[in-house]
Amino acid sequence: MLQLFYKPAPILEESGPGWFAPARPRPYAKRPPPLELALAAKRSLISPWQANDYTSTYGSIRLFGRQVFLANSPETVKYVMATRHDNYERKSPQMRRALEYLLGDGLFISDGETWKRRRPLVSDIVHKNRVPTFGLTMEAVTLAMVERWRARPAGEPFNALTEMAELTAEIISRAVFGNHLGAGAAHQVVEAFTRYQGLIDNFNFGYFLGADEGLPVFRGPRLRRAVAQLDRVIDKVVSDHLAGHGEHNSMVDLLVKRQQKSPELGLDLSALRNEAATIFMAGHETTAAVLTWAWYLVANAPWVEEAVLAEIDRVCGGRTPTVADVPKLDWCRSVIEETLRLYPPVPILARQAKEADRIGGIDIDPAALVVVAPWLLHRAVELWEHPERFRPERFLSERPAPYTYIPFAIGPRICAGLAFGLTESILCFAILIQQFRVRVVPGTKVEPASRLTLRPAGGLPVTAQPRG
């Protein structure tokens, strides 16, 4: 039925000698009618943009009466995410409604006093100074995956997204809860969250028709089953930990100790579960998506793969990369950072204005939707040379200008797990690429799509050939 009103944009992908411009939807030549724009966004949040949006700019439109302001210049990004953070700290009704069923009042979608009280706790627990300890878990889990991949029949295709999600779910489980998740439970998490993303309504029509808080998501039987499947896994590992079966100094153990020391924090069992679920879901899903996109990009850029392998050989010799090597793996880091530029895990950072404001000479309504879009900002033609091309070397020599590169958001709400996720991505990538030649199955049509996070639609079928 939707096809009568909306036809998905074609997917562009080009390559030439020494360059590769990976998959992305073709921009609209001009702004589509409101209904078509809404249906495009409902299908994928990176679909409804027009060519002019891929510039360093800002502007305002009305969609069914609701003001939508796009902040896509470094100045407006800074204003929204840092200077006036107090007015734009609240996530959009779409994001809150889409995730509240799963995460409760977890840090990712909370605001106000709840966010202020819990943010320092979570930030300290995933602080960069703790990463070397967590790095040992990352190494062990990735090496176990190496052994499983080596045991596969030669040339057997598999879904890289599923594999990367199971890898990162096991890593975050051991780091957060101090116990093994296991392949079966990891698969349940990955499968259930994939179904949840497919079922959730990521475009809340009620908000655009006048309900400032949006309308509750319809919790049909399939959505309830997906959440129940996730809850079973998460609640079991939390319960096991509280029963004394987890390791000391895991993230949850540290949260429990903080609550015992400071009861005023209000981290009751429900709050503890919500924060654990938030760390678990955000911690595994975003890194899994980044690693999946990295395999797609490197498979289509053999000159980059050669540079990466030469670096690993130079830094590590014949041994396996460790967390101590990460600071010296510049090419590996650049591949991950360029992957994050092209495919930021959360490509649309939407905020809801608390009160009236004025940005760049444009009046902002109370409860307006204010959109900062890494998907657009990272591809703005004035800010990046050949923005559509995969060029990791751009990150080797210099850092991007402030407020032009925000894959983990920016300002007070920058991702608390940034150091953890970046180290995990670099280390897992280095270990696996040293051991395997990963290639996308010929004939695969890669389509990036975003409902909650940016994934290849339908996954990414690949093969992994052992090296040497």
Image (cartoon, rainbow, N blue to C red):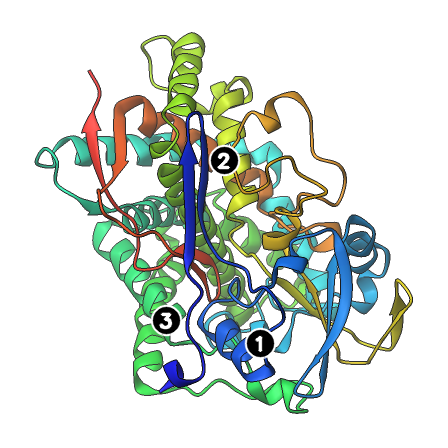
Q: What amino acid is labelled 2 in the image?
A: Phe
Q: Earlier in the sequence, mark 1 or mark 3?
A: 1
| Closer to the eye: label 1 or 2 | 2
Identify residue for label 2.
390
SS at mark 2 in the image: loop
SS at mark 3 in the image: helix
Q: Is residue 131 above or below residue 126?
A: above
In the picture, measured across the screen, residue 430 lies left or right of residue 56, that is left
| Closer to the eye: label 3 or 2 | 2
Identify the residue shown where x is 12% and y is 33%.
Answer: 151
Give the tally of numbered discs.
3
Q: Position of residue 44 (x, y in %)?
A: 47, 67
Q: Which residue of the protein is positioned furthest toward the left in this rendering?
A: 153
Identify the residue shown where x is 35% and y is 59%.
Answer: 457
Q: Position of residue 362 (x, y in %)?
A: 87, 70
Q: Is residue 430 above or below residue 200?
A: above
Badge 1: residue crowd in 10 Å (few <14, some 14–19, many ≥20): many
Q: What amino acid is labelled 3 in the image?
A: Gly
In the picture, measured across the screen, residue 95 lies left or right of residue 157, that is right
Identify residue for label 1.
94
Quadrant of the rendering where the C terminus is positioned: top left
Disc 1 to disc 3, how far (Cα)?
15 Å
